[in-house]
Amino acid sequence: VSADPHAELAQASRAAFPSAYDEAFRRFAAQAASCEAIDTEATGPGGARLSTQVAWFGKPDARNVLVLLSGVHGVETACGSGIQIDWLRMDGPSRLQDDEAVLLVHALNPHGFAWDRRVTEEGCDLNRNFVVFERGVPLNSDYPRLAPFLVPAGLDAATLAEAEAQLARLRAELGEVAFQRARKSGQYIDPKGTFFGGFGPTKARLRLERIAAQFELQNRAFVTIIDIHTGLGPFGYGEPQDEHQPGSASSRLCRAFFGESVTSPDLGTSYSVSVHGTVGEWFMRNLADGAHVYLCLEFGTYDQERSRKVLREDQWLFVHATEEIERPIGRAIRARTRAHYFPGTPDWCELVLMRGRQIIAQAFAGMRDRSSGRLP
Ligand SMILES: [Zn+2]
């Protein structure tokens, strides 16, 4: 009689998903003996220095590389970390073929992880920061109209009621898609506002660029990048978002690898609106079309209105009430942000693990089909 498969999944998810930065760091180091800790200048509560960890499995000159990336949005790290740690615990490295390698990038934005925030130490949304700043930043002309009401200076009932009324008015005027784009697609004017894309490359962006250069991703025959996020879509569902130009070779391969559940923000089939300056844009600029697939794997948690309110509190705390960050009000706000982006319930974690395992298997199958000529 074989083991209970659900009991195995439940046990694996308890062993994989970390509760916080320290535990994630230790678990990753324990599972990936060869990992390298890249020190950053960011510090966590208590002043401890924080690191991004990287680990390579397979031959140094492997032709096909799978990159698993966790923690672009710091507070979302535990989800991607759990998928990475599970792959290691399940002996993923022993199943690599001769021409395959895996690069794990763990906690790219450790500041956000340690402080329960999406943003970097610069207050920047890293997934809006990969624009080409020399060419000029995208214009988000509706954002300034929303900004004072998205994060008012106070969170008292009267102020909130007024802000909500103003937002409802703007939402009706703009329509839902334009409203969400104004709110979330990125703004490049106010470091104290939400979804700030930066005035230049952040330290975390430069770190990812150095990692990509160190492991020579541009010289590989094929690279698949799975960038793991949370916070959008149905609870526990992992939506594979194709950010490639519709009709491009990489977009066709993305669908061939990951199947009919693939969605596209550009085509309006995703829970996400299309946004500027994503990690995916950077890979698309630096790796040839048809020689890579970038997938944003987005796990749903709670609804968007809840996330809007969670982010309002978070931004208020770190902009208007910094003295509260390590006091009870601040701790409560941070705990709500953390729970929003990482629910951590057994059912949610098990869904994430199942989907994570499936997506990794699909990525390898796709790269093997492509290598052997079964995919154009
Ligand atoms: Zn994210």
Image (cartoon, rainbow, N blue to C red):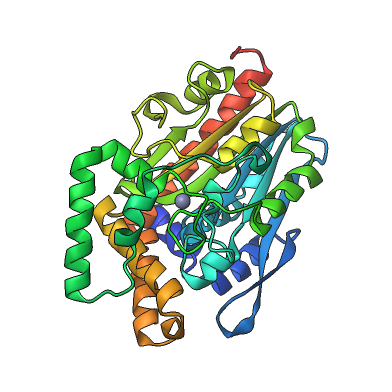
Picture quarter containing residue 216?
A: top right
Residue at (52% x, 18% y) in the render: 252
Residue at (47% x, 23% y) in the render: 255
Q: Relative to 245, is 171 above or below?
A: below
Taking depth in this image into account, of 105 and 289 the one nearest to the observer is 289
**Relative to 284, is 149 on the left or the right?**
left
Q: Position of residue 83 (x, y in %)?
A: 51, 52
Taking depth in this image into account, of 87 and 228 the one nearest to the observer is 228
Q: Residue furthest right?
A: 61
Residue 90 in view in this figure? no
Q: Relative to 102, is 302 above or below?
A: below
Say how many tags the image has. 0
Q: Position of residue 36 (x, y in %)?
A: 75, 60
Q: Relative to 137, is 36 above or below?
A: below
Picture quarter containing residue 302?
A: bottom left
Taking depth in this image into account, of 314 and 45 the one nearest to the observer is 314
Q: Position of residue 25 (x, y in %)?
A: 61, 68
Taking depth in this image into account, of 29 and 150 the one nearest to the observer is 150
Image quarter (top left, top right, bottom left or bottom right) of the C terminus: top right
Q: Position of residue 307 (x, y in %)?
A: 31, 57
**Relative to 212, is 182 on the left or the right?**
left
Residue 166 in view in this figure? yes
Residue at (60% x, 20% y) in the render: 369
**Relative to 353, is 92 on the left or the right?**
right
Residue at (17% x, 73% y) in the render: 158
